[in-house]
Image (spheres, rainbow, N blue to C red):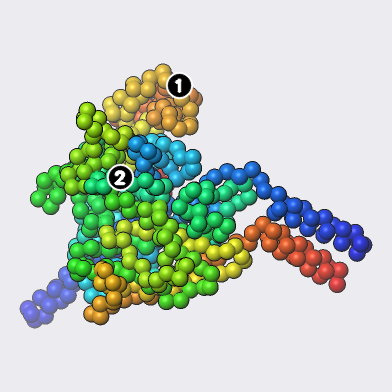
């Protein structure tokens, strides 16, 4: 009798476990993060005489723009039961929101670095917590992203002139704006040291580019300019930076870095008023608050 | 409408079409775009067959990894588009010889997003060999903006080595503009890095790419005229 009841209990526990723990479905990383596909974004690197250029793919080319935040690629996390296989190199993206739409490309290249030199990319500045992985190298960390021993990787990376969609990632609990600024230069193929003349000046003028990404708050909250789910002093500082600036919806101002919330062409008291209305509302803590409206689209 | 008047209308339409195709517009140099003509990523997104290797076998999966690659059919097929009137390629550029006067597309891109490099034996690479393809289909390797002919184009080898680091590769496919459908069937296998000789102990995969081609303006006009005529005839009957 005792054995029978134990057996029944075990079966019940097993069934509850099966129901409660959904089976993991192993998936592959997709370009827009999570399991979302979408277009590539291709900064074209090429040499224009003695100048390194990063441009769009048009002819004549336009220098690579800095995207408005609302038009920047989104980092997305997997939604369970989707999961990455621990045996695969992309398992490093587990628990992270990621995206690899940006892809360094060589579609306009005609002139190559001199013998013994290559194109190098140096990260000059980036948002804390932003990680970068080189897909072509088996998802190896680059640009300061800690390696498996938690040691930071070098801030330079040699671009081999292939189409390289590095993967950018943050912990999935992070919400907000993300940015990274890069210098693209010609350097020694082995060391990455910039190629310079006798006076210590670069022989090839480097290019500078900035990428933007968003890991948007799952709720739309007026006044939450930086998309981190709360209206606070970080948003206030963005308004202060743009105070009384005039702007419009076109690049590069794009509504004064989106501090012109009412889109009336100036950052003024009307915008401050919007911010004060929702001051210190936190949509992650209290998502039922009326100002917190679920953000459409797959996050 | 009398037969004579109808003939005059058709004659005039034909004359305008011929005039439009003969008189070149002021041309602007442009760069090749992923969807052919000047169709960018936004209207012609990339199509990414995922090449994977599990240590034993090469497989090609659908873009979302949800199963084996499936040949695209119907409207899912990418279309080869020629440049529109008023656009042209600069004859000094690498893509000129490959794409000038042709309809083209490079939406298909072999993807490494699901490829674990660590699993590939040393001195080996992933090779792709074209087994069969439509007559007149030309393929160009866009690595380093070279537009080198591959896959039998210009009588060259049918084999092509995927980049050493297996980075994403969008080869360009080009055809003489015509209203037609195109295909190419590829064998994807593990081969010797230098020679491309298949290594017998590894499994391989076979996939087919398909394309449609859009009619050039004059052909489209003739097709339109034909349709009008047929409609007219049907109504009359």
Q: Can you see residue A22? A: no
Quadrant position of residue A179:
top left
Among all residues in the image, which is located at the extreme left?
A2
Image location (x, y in percent) of residue B24 = 67, 48
Q: Nearer the viewer, residue A262 or B72?
A: B72
Q: Chain of mark 1?
A: A
Image location (x, y in percent) of residue B210 = 49, 69
Local crowd size for mark 1, using a 10 Å CA cut-off: few (<14), some (14–19), many (≥20)? some
The image shows residue A61, relative to residue B118, as above or below, that is above
Residue at mark 2 shares a chain with residue at mark 1: yes
Residue occupying image coordinates x 61% and y 65%: B178
Q: Nearer the viewer, residue A103 or A250?
A: A103
Contact between marks 2 and 1 (CB within 8 A): the answer is no
Residue occupying image coordinates x 43% and y 57%: B147
Image location (x, y in percent) of residue A23 = 25, 67
Q: Earlier in the sequence, mark 2 or mark 1?
A: 2
The image shows residue B173, relative to residue A184, as above or below, that is below
| Residue A49 appears left or right of A6 | right
The image shows residue B215, relative to residue B196, as above or below, that is above
Residue occupying image coordinates x 28% and y 51%: A160
Query: Which residue bears the numbered disc 2?
Result: A113
Residue occupying image coordinates x 39% and y 30%: A257
Q: Nearer the viewer, residue A228 or A242?
A: A242
Tell me how far mark 2 sits from mark 1, CA to CA. Answer: 43 Å
Which disc, if any, is residue A143? none
Q: Chain of mark 2?
A: A
Quadrant position of residue A228:
top left
Query: Which residue bears the numbered disc 1?
Result: A246
């Amino acid at each position: 009798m005792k054995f029978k009841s134990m057996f029944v209990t075990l079966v019940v526990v097993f069934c509850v476990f099966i129901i409660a723990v959904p089976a993991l479905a192993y998936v592959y990383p997709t370009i827009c993060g999570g399991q979302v596909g979408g277009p590539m974004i291709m900064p074209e690197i090429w040499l224009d005489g003695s100048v390194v250029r990063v441009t769009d793919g048009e002819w004549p080319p336009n220098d690579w723009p800095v995207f408005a935040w609302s038009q920047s690629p989104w980092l997305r996390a997997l939604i369970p039961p989707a999961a990455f296989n621990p045996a695969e190199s992309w398992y490093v993206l587990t628990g992270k929101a990621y995206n690899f739409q940006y892809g360094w490309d060589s579609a306009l290249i005609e002139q190559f670095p001199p013998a013994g030199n290559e194109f190098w990319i140096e990260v000059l500045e980036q948002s804390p917590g932003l990680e970068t992985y080189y897909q072509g190298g088996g998802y190896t960390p680059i640009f300061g992203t800690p390696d498996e021993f938690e040691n930071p990787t070098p801030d330079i990376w040699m671009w081999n002139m292939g189409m390289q969609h590095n993967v950018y990632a943050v912990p999935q609990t992070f919400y907000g704006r993300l940015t990274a600024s890069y210098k693209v230069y010609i350097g020694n193929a082995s060391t990455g040291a910039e190629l310079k003349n006798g006076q210590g000046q670069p022989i090839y003028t480097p290019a500078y580019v900035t990428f933007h990404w968003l890991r948007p708050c799952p709720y739309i909250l007026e006044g939450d300019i930086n998309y981190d789910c709360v209206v606070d002093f970080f948003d206030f500082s963005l308004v202060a930076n743009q105070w009384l600036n005039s702007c419009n919806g076109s690049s590069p101002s794009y509504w004064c870095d989106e501090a012109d919330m009412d889109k009336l062409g100036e950052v003024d008291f009307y915008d401050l008023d919007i911010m004060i209305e929702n001051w210190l509302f936190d949509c992650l803590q209290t998502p039922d608050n009326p100002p917190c409206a679920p953000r459409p689209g797959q996050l | 409408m009398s037969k004579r008047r109808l003939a005059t209308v058709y004659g005039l339409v034909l004359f305008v079409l011929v005039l439009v195709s003969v008189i070149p517009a002021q041309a602007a140099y442009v760069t090749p775009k992923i969807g052919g003509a000047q169709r960018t990523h936004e209207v012609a997104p990339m199509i990414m067959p995922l090449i994977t290797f599990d240590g034993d076998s090469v497989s090609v999966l659908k873009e979302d990894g949800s199963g084996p690659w499936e040949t695209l059919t119907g409207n899912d097929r990418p279309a080869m588009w020629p440049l529109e009137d008023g656009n042209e390629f600069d004859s000094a550029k690498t893509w000129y010889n490959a794409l000038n006067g042709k309809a083209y597309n490079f939406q298909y891109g072999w993807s490494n997003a699901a490829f674990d490099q660590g699993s590939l034996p040393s001195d080996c690479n992933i090779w792709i060999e074209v087994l069969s393809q439509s007559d007149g289909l030309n393929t160009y390797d866009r690595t380093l903006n070279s537009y080198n002919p591959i896959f039998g184009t210009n009588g060259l080898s049918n084999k092509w080595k995927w980049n050493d680091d297996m980075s994403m590769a969008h080869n360009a496919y080009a055809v003489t503009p015509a209203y037609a459908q195109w295909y190419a069937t590829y064998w994807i296998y593990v081969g010797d890095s230098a020679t491309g000789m298949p290594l017998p102990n590894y499994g391989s995969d076979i996939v087919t790419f398909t394309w449609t081609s859009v009619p050039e303006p004059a052909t489209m006009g003739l097709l339109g005229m034909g349709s009008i005529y047929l409609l007219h005839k049907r109504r009359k009957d």
